[in-house]
Image (cartoon, rainbow, N blue to C red):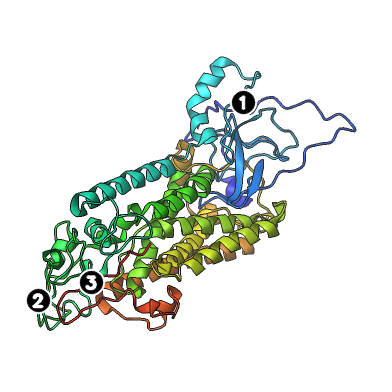
């Protein structure tokens, strides 16, 4: 397209660009009568400024449509010619041709394949390409592995701390934790999302009587027990919070402000069952997704979805709920797999079956979120954030890119590469060249993308303002996270009996 002609330059600032990863010599012409390979499907993962169709060899699964990468960083089996080198610049037009490379795939993002022997590449070239292949070809999901390890270590710390405080590694008194994990009060003390530690709360700062709270080491429900006579500051831990005074108001200063409780709960889990299910999903679906889109985009969606889910829950969940877990993060990744399927619908072998599996997962998860002990607002918020960010950071839908005449180019380009940095600098210097010659459908799609991003950012700001300033409550929203059965929807409310001891929800939500 005209807008991309600017970027199709053989040199950069007068210097020729050395391409160490030039494609291998083309295969001999096809023999008549031989069956050619089918045109591979496309995957929608891309940079925000990249709207090219990226054909790939891929496998179909409920977790997405993940490409294979060849030894030189290009996708294999393209019907449109060899992919670009590992210094591929996303906005550059690459000539289409009928030739294909004879390089075999080195890495299968879906099945974790290893290195394939390619006798056509000389040892010196292989050594020269080694680091680039490690970046573009293997793409080890370091972020998923690191997060999983951190969450495991943190869970072990939870167990050790619970054992030190209550003389038991898991909560068995005053009641058993069905997730097989630490007590609610230990999790609050370690950073679970707990509204009274984060802002002034109705029934706490404006209470007419002095309130005492359970201590982190409590194993009793007897209000006269010394372990039930702690202050709010002692329960919240860290640097503490201002203790409310009898006869105070919601406007008393200073107010509790442990804002980091929107982030820390991502690393905490309520028990063995909780962390086992999350790690299972994270090390399968999450691992494959990070391989496809790169660690930076994956981390952006992961943390944004988790934080947005906790912010949404902080506004509309019951104030006595202690919420932990990375479920909101994983619902954001689940939203990416749904977009992946919809964007490449026509290229999938059995899209209806794949869609049925994904919808079934989503529906079951949201229904389970209605049960006591589950914070469905984290699930809902994480999924919505994942959808919006997926629209912004993934490729445009394949059908749309074909309609606006985009070319079929090489593999997904990681963010942290020299080529991407140069492209961004060139875009900053002359941004209007990027928009020159674009078609109507391109403009409509990008306006929709910008609107979606603006909308979710505005929603985030509104929710934060409502949480800290306005404290507007939604009477019916609680039914998104509970069923009106046996007073389930009242289980998370703070209980302030006449004995002045306030008891948070037990056990924690996740």
Left or right of 232? Residue 80 is right
Marks 3 and 1 in Cβ contact (< 8 Å): no
Distance, label 2 to label 1, CA atoms, is 69 Å
Quarter location, residue 124: top right
* Callout in the foreground (2, 3): 3
Q: Residues within 10 Å of mark 3 (few under 14, many from 20)?
A: many
Residue 495 vs 374, above or below: the answer is below
Q: Residue at x 32, y 43 (%)?
A: 153
Q: Which residue is mark 2?
A: 245
Quarter location, residue 499: bottom left
SS at mark 1 in the image: loop
Q: Which residue is mark 1?
A: 116
* Callout in the foreground (3, 1): 3
Residue 309 vs 295, above or below: the answer is below
Q: Position of residue 431 (x, y in %)?
A: 48, 53
Q: Residue at x 62, y 58 (%)?
A: 357
Q: Residue at x 55, y 28 (%)?
A: 19
SS at mark 2 in the image: loop
Q: Position of residue 119 (x, y in %)?
A: 65, 18
Q: Is residue 428 visible?
A: no
Q: Residue at x 56, y 36 (%)?
A: 112
Q: Position of residue 197 (x, y in %)?
A: 21, 66
Q: Position of residue 81 (x, y in %)?
A: 70, 37
Nearer the observer, 223 or 325? 223
Nearer the observer, 257 or 485? 485
Nearer the observer, 427 or 250? 250
Left or right of 207? Residue 456 is right
SS at mark 3 in the image: loop
Q: Which residue is mark 3?
A: 503
Identify the mark nearer the N-term, 3 or 1. Answer: 1
């Amino acid at each position: 397209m005209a807008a991309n002609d600017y970027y199709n330059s053989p040199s950069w600032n007068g210097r020729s660009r050395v391409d160490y990863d030039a494609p291998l010599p083309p295969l001999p012409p096809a023999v008549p009568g031989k069956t050619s390979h089918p045109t591979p499907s496309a995957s929608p993962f891309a940079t925000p400024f990249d709207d090219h169709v990226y054909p790939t060899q891929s496998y179909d699964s409920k977790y997405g449509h993940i490409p294979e990468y060849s030894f030189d960083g290009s996708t294999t089996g393209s019907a449109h010619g060899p992919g670009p080198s590992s210094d591929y610049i996303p906005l550059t037009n690459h000539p289409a041709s009928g030739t294909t490379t004879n390089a075999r795939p080195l890495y299968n993002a879906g099945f974790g394949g290893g290195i394939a022997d390619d006798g056509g590449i000389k040892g010196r070239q292989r050594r020269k390409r080694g680091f680039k292949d490690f970046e573009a070809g293997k793409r080890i999901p370091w972020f998923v592995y690191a997060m999983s390890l951190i969450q495991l270590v943190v869970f072990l710390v939870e167990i050790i701390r619970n054992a030190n405080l209550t003389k038991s590694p898991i909560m068995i008194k005053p009641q058993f934790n069905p997730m097989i994990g630490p007590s609610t009060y230990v999790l609050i003390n370690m950073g679970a999302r707990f509204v009274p530690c984060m802002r002034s709360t109705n029934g706490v700062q404006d209470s007419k009587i002095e309130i005492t709270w359970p201590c982190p080491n409590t194993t009793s429900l007897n209000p006269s027990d010394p372990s039930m006579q702690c202050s709010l500051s002692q329960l919240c831990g860290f640097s503490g919070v201002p203790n409310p005074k009898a006869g105070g108001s919601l406007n008393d200063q200073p107010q509790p402000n442990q804002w980091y409780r929107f982030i820390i709960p991502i690393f905490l889990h309520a028990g063995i069952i909780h962390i086992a299910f999350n790690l299972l999903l994270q090390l399968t679906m999450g691992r494959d997704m990070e391989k496809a889109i790169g660690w930076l985009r994956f981390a952006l969606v992961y943390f944004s979805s988790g934080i947005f889910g906790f912010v949404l829950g902080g506004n509309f969940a019951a104030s006595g709920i202690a919420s932990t877990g990375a479920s909101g993060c994983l619902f954001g990744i689940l939203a990416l797999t749904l977009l992946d399927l919809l964007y490449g619908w026509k290229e999938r072998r059995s899209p209806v079956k794949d869609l049925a599996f994904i919808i079934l997962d989503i529906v079951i998860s949201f229904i389970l979120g209605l049960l006591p002990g589950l914070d469905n607002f984290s699930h809902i918020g994480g999924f919505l954030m994942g959808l919006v960010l997926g629209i912004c950071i993934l490729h445009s839908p394949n059908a749309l890119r074909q309609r606006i005449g985009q070319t079929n180019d090489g593999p997904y380009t990681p963010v942290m590469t020299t080529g991407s940095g140069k492209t961004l600098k060139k875009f900053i210097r002359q941004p209007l060249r990027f928009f020159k010659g674009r078609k109507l459908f391109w403009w409509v799609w990008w306006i929709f993308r910008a609107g979606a991003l603006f909308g979710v950012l505005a929603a985030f700001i509104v929710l934060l303002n409502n949480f800290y300033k306005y404290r507007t409550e939604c009477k019916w929203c609680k039914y998104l996270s509970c069923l009106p059965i046996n007073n389930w929807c009242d289980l998370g409310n703070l209980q302030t009996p006449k004995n002045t001891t306030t008891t948070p929800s037990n056990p924690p939500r996740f």
